[in-house]
């Protein structure tokens, strides 16, 4: 496998005499990460996205005052831009297994960490994307096999220890059609493949586009992962925009106490020469741009839209 281009450049940046006077990692940021290409691998959470039917759908609503606020709002008042100067949203999310996710092992095994106990070292890792979309196009229930991983490595080199491995199936091309959550079988990752990745290649975690790991009666892959202290990503998107090797992945999620699942955001950070994504400075970010169409509450959509 070609070495991770960003990591090699970052090491060079830190060793560069021209950047030697920049504090800590600032030199690496200016030399490598500022010009890198950033690609969002996450879905937007809305009230109608695909979700396992056992959990039910979520509800968004306009936030209301929970008590009387003298001279400002009465209990039960909906906060509005016109009357109060701001608006807020109330979310009724019936599960922490929603949208793009990070599954901590406590999802199945309470003796292992919950989402708030995952270490900060998860933040940034080498990213590997194994494509199997061609096989899925022929068999929608295809599951990644050890042979697929070995073929990938023959072409790209050994998967690095501590990396994140995302499996591309193109299942997410059907998002946000809620029918996706009931379509079976769906593309999966076999138990043998998971064991190979973790026990032979010692990866940090794997991720897949569907909302479950496999379609076996006992969800054997997910059960094995959770009961052995491993995490996984679910509901990943846009893997067709990322090369198989050479990128990093940034992992972000809220620290919900005792959480057994996590609403996550994954961002691929790719070399500046990559054809997809955006770099710092290519789009306005501080301040963010003003829209000609103000955000407003849409009763039919059950959320704010432009």
Image (tube, helix red, strand yellow):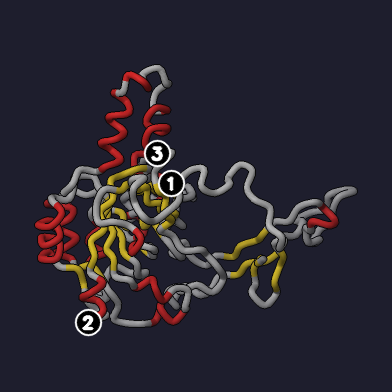
Instruction: Quickly name the residue at label 3.
Output: 33
Instruction: Point out the tag, 1 or 2, that comes first from the N-terminus.
Output: 1
Disc 1 residue crowd, few under 14, some 14–19, many 20+, Cα 10 Å = some
Instruction: Point out the tag, 1 or 3, that comes first from the N-terminus.
Output: 3
Instruction: Point out the tag, 2 or 3, that comes first from the N-terminus.
Output: 3
Q: Which residue sits at x=27%, y=63%?
A: 167
Label 1 residue SS: helix
Label 2 residue SS: helix
Front of the two marks 2 and 3: 3
Instruction: Quickly name the residue at label 1.
Output: 116
- Quarter assignment of residue 14: top left
The residue at the far right in this view is 71
Counting from the top left corner in percent of width and height, residue 292 is at 71, 60
> Which of the numbered marks, if any, corresponds to residue 138?
2
Q: Which residue sits at x=70%, y=71%?
A: 298
Q: Name the side, left or right, on which 301 lies relative to 143.
A: right
Question: Dots 1 and 2: beta carbons under 8 Å?
Answer: no
Counting from the top left corner in percent of width and height, residue 151 is at 11, 62
> Which of the numbered marks, if any, corresponds to residue 276?
none
Q: CA distance from mark 1 to mark 2?
A: 40 Å
Disc 3 residue crowd, few under 14, some 14–19, many 20+, Cα 10 Å = many
- Quarter assignment of residue 162: top left
Query: Compared with residue 173, is residue 294 higher up or lower down, i.e. above or below?
Result: above
């Amino acid at each position: 496998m070609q070495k991770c281009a960003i990591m090699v450049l970052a090491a060079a940046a830190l060793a560069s005499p021209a950047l030697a006077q920049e504090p800590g990692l600032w030199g690496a940021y200016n030399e490598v990460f500022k010009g890198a290409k950033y690609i969002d691998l996450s879905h937007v959470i809305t009230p109608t996205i695909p979700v396992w039917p056992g959990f039910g759908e979520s509800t968004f609503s306009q936030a209301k005052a929970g008590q009387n606020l003298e001279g400002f709002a009465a209990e039960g008042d909906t906060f509005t831009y016109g009357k109060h100067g701001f608006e807020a949203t109330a979310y009724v999310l019936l599960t922490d297994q929603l949208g793009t996710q990070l599954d901590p092992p406590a999802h199945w095994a309470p003796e292992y960490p919950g989402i708030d106990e995952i270490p900060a070292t998860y933040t940034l890792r080498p990213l590997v994307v194994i494509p199997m979309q061609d096989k899925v196009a022929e068999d929608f229930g295809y599951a990644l096999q050890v042979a697929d991983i070995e073929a990938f490595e023959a072409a790209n080199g050994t998967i690095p220890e501590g990396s994140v491995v995302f499996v591309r199936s193109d299942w997410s091309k059907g998002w946000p059609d809620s029918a996706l959550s009931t379509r079976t079988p769906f593309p999966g990752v076999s138990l043998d493949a998971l064991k190979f990745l973790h026990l032979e290649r010692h990866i940090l975690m794997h991720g897949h586009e569907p909302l479950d790991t496999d379609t076996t009666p006992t969800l054997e892959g997910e059960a094995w992962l959770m009961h052995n202290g491993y995490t996984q990503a679910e509901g990943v998107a846009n893997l067709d925009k990322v090369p198989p090797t050479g990128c990093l992945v940034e992992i972000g999620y809220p620290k919900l106490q005792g959480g057994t699942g996590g609403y996550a955001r994954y961002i691929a950070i790719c070399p500046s020469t990559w054809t997809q994504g955006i770099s710092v400075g290519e789009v306005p970010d501080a301040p963010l741009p003003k829209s000609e169409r103000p955000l407003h509450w849409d009763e039919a959509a059950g959320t704010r839209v432009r």
